[in-house]
Image (tube, rainbow, N blue to C red):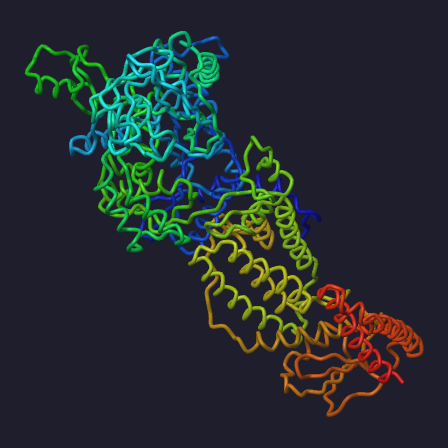
Amino acid sequence: MAISQNYESQKVEDKWYNYWMEHNFFHSEVDERTPYTIVIPPPNVTGVLHMGHMLNNTIQDVLIRRARFKGFNACWVPGTDHASIATEAKVVAKLKAEGINKNDLTREEFLEHAWDWTHKHGGIILEQLKKLGASCDWERTKFTMDDTMSASVIKVFVDLYEKGLIYRGYRMVNWDPEAKTTLSDEEVIYQEKQGNLYYLNYKIENSDETVTIATTRPETILGDTAICINPNDERFAHLRGKKAIVPLANRTIPIIEDDYVDVEFGTGCLKVTPAHDENDKAIGEHHNLEVIDIFNDDATLNSFGLHYKGMDRFDARKKIVNELEELGILVKTETHINKVGTSERTGAVIEPKLSDQWFLKMKDLAQPALDAVLDKDVNLVPDKFVNTYKHWMENVRDWNISRQLWWGQQIPAYFYGDGKEDFVVAENAEKALEKAIERTGKSSLTITDLTQDADALDTWFSSWLWPMSVFNGILEPDNKEINYYYPTNDLVTAPEILFFWVARMIIAGYEYRGEKPFTNVYLTGIVRDKQRRKMSKSLGNSPDPLALINQYGADGVRVGMLLSSPAGNDLMFDEDLCKQGSGFINKIWNSFKLVNSWEVDENKQQNEAAKLAVKWYKAKFQKTLLEIEDHYSKYRMSDALMATYKLVWDDYCSWFLEMVKPAFGEAIDKKTYDEVISILEDNLKILHPFVPFVSEEIWQQLKSRTPEEALIISRWPEFVEVDQNIINEFSFASEVISGVRTIRKSKNISFKDEINLAVLNAENASENFNPVIKKMCNIADINYVTQQVDGALSFRVKANEYFIPMEGAIDVEEEIKKLTEELNYTEGFLKSVQKKLSNERFVNNAPESVVAVEKAKQADAEAKIEVLKKSLAALK
């Protein structure tokens, strides 16, 4: 059979991916088989493939391909997330570049632009996943803004509202001034940053006295509405009932008392700004203080900012500090480390902001999801994340689910009056009108009297329904697909979204299906570079995944990614891993070329060495198959790959093929050849989940096959009992072979020349593999002796001693000369070391480590001299 000399990955990958797609091998329909279901963590519609996606989706593809082999009805549902904040930001930026301001558009006009952008860019990452070999059921591709997906979100919102779990409240929220939207607590990343602590003097009204306040944010003094002291702090007892004057603003504010104030922090006096700090808000509510918000939505100062109106908050801070210093109000400045909240999406520094928002009560909803993980109904792999999950769920806060965006599912709340409570919640305007008329008793109300809440729902509020909504399980909770495919089996995702997404999906599963959404959650690590830095565009340390695939092939990159990716532990990515993976693919290909090059003789009898080789490899394969199964069951993908890698590279390529290979110019017998092909087919089956392309290419080249016989839908090798005895026997024989080969190489004894081997069998080792030893070492005869053989070179394997007679094999005189020269040199070296060690001054003054090195040199030299003397004695 003519095959290409070099493995051409791009041609092979395109050919077989198209073939799999053409024959619909990835598609699943409800049938009588047991389902195996994975739902993809939907990447952002704005995204392109990065190294984290590569790792995550390679693992999923390994699992789904193996499930097909195991006879399951494998269904891997792909899709993308509409990513409200990220997508809206990209669309706004595009419009801006075209000279269009979002604020000049109606919501409907903006959404037209957003959909145009999504249709143009939204499928890029899924197409890229195909290059990796991802065998998703592309016919089932979902998008979180699809009509049925959006309808599911709205239905759930209405249901939870009617259950009293969703409410509207005026709360302090996390405000992203770049995206101009609120964020949930989980979307805020806290980072320690060095800032300043500014000490300011506030005048006491009708007095020359001042009180010093310490603040990290001097611009917020413009929103101060009180100064607070601890009622037990006698230092400030004389200030009780008095008022202070806010610097720059010249407003008079009361001095109040509250236990919240820490007498040890700063000066012991606290400025209270209820609009810009969660704790200040609580104090303000307790003391009925005025609330003054000094910021616009983009964190520029508003009219309360005086002459700094319109200025960015950080620029205003610098100017205000300068003015305070000029006025003599700034007493001193100290460096100060504090935690600063930043937006998980935009990186902008978060502003605490009071706002009307929608919240979901989480405490009671979270309990079944917490129990599911603690009771192991849902398994987190590795289980080190259970404590993190437990901490989050036990301390869960109400979820802020509204966002001040247009791209997303619009909140189904309809206002019919001017009051904050003048609204109804319904799935559409028609139903909302019915509810509004019923609530108000005004039959004259029309749809035009209703105004829908302008906010959109948090993106996670759609993706938390993902395992159900992809099978339409919310709108049609008893349809055949949701009943068949749900709960899904495995979820592969990153630890950083364990609460964002995983926990919320479990919560939703118990709330809407009364059961878990999946059984196992495989948590991958973060892909880092060799310096342990997280890969990112900003650092420039993240390679282009498609460039890697072009260079090393998809199979090579898959192997490279998985070679060092234990669950939950970070992957230290090195491009050399992909090079190693590519080398493995070439090894597989070249071994196939070797087998394919053999001529087959139908009449030739199978020799004993080949018979033993086949029996041994089958036993070794079964033992490795057991190991692989164990690794898969524990989600140790890296270990499963490594076991497969070693079996194919070491046992199959390096040993088995050498054991059965016909002599140069000779043919292989038909029985052995058929056994080799059968073994190769089993190898391809366990390789396929990791390296689908090269395995399918070889499988199809072995013989003509129908689509129904494609490797991708083949069956996993059957397990039979392991013959451990023959594995042990070969292990011993392989050491003998290595020993003979080492001597041949070191003594330049041509492998074309036959030699004899004598054995002092103190170990009482089996002779079964002697035919293999003879073939692999080109040995004419193996003789068993009762004493050492003179004039021979020897080596040991356990208690057995093996002798290779040198007569005729080497030039004895030349070997004696060579060994004598080496002995003389080593003895001279030993004398120099001994001289140094006999010097008391050196031994007493040199560091112990240096002396230890010299003693080690002495011991090595003495051992080498002993071996050289024995070898010389054997030759004389």
Quadrant in the rendering for residue 180: top left
Q: Which residue is more in the foreground, 859 or 289?
A: 289
Quadrant in the rendering for residue 754: bottom right
Tell me where residue 494 appears, x and y as whole percent: 43, 43
Q: Is residue 67 left or right of residue 571?
A: left
In the figure, 114 relative to 136: above or below?
Answer: above
On the rendered image, what quadrant is the C terminus found in?
bottom right
Residue 358 visible in image = no
Q: Is residue 67 left or right of residue 817?
A: left
Residue 742 visible in image = yes
Quadrant in the rendering for residue 557: top right
Tell me where residue 157 appears, x and y as whole percent: 23, 30
Q: Which residue is more in the foreground, 93 or 694?
A: 93
Tell me where residue 638 appears, x and y as whole percent: 52, 54
- Name the residue at 72% across, 85% down: 759
Tell me where residue 432 appears, x and y as whole percent: 16, 20
> Number of labelled discs?
0
- Name the residue at 46% across, 31% down: 336
Q: Residue furthest bottom?
A: 786
Q: Residue furthest left?
A: 441
- Name the residue at 26% across, 51% down: 371
In the figure, 608 relative to 398: above or below?
Answer: below
- Name the residue at 67% across, 74% down: 735
Q: Which residue is more in the foreground, 178 or 426?
A: 178
In the figure, 28 relative to 206: above or below?
Answer: below
Q: Is residue 553 left or right of residue 147?
A: right
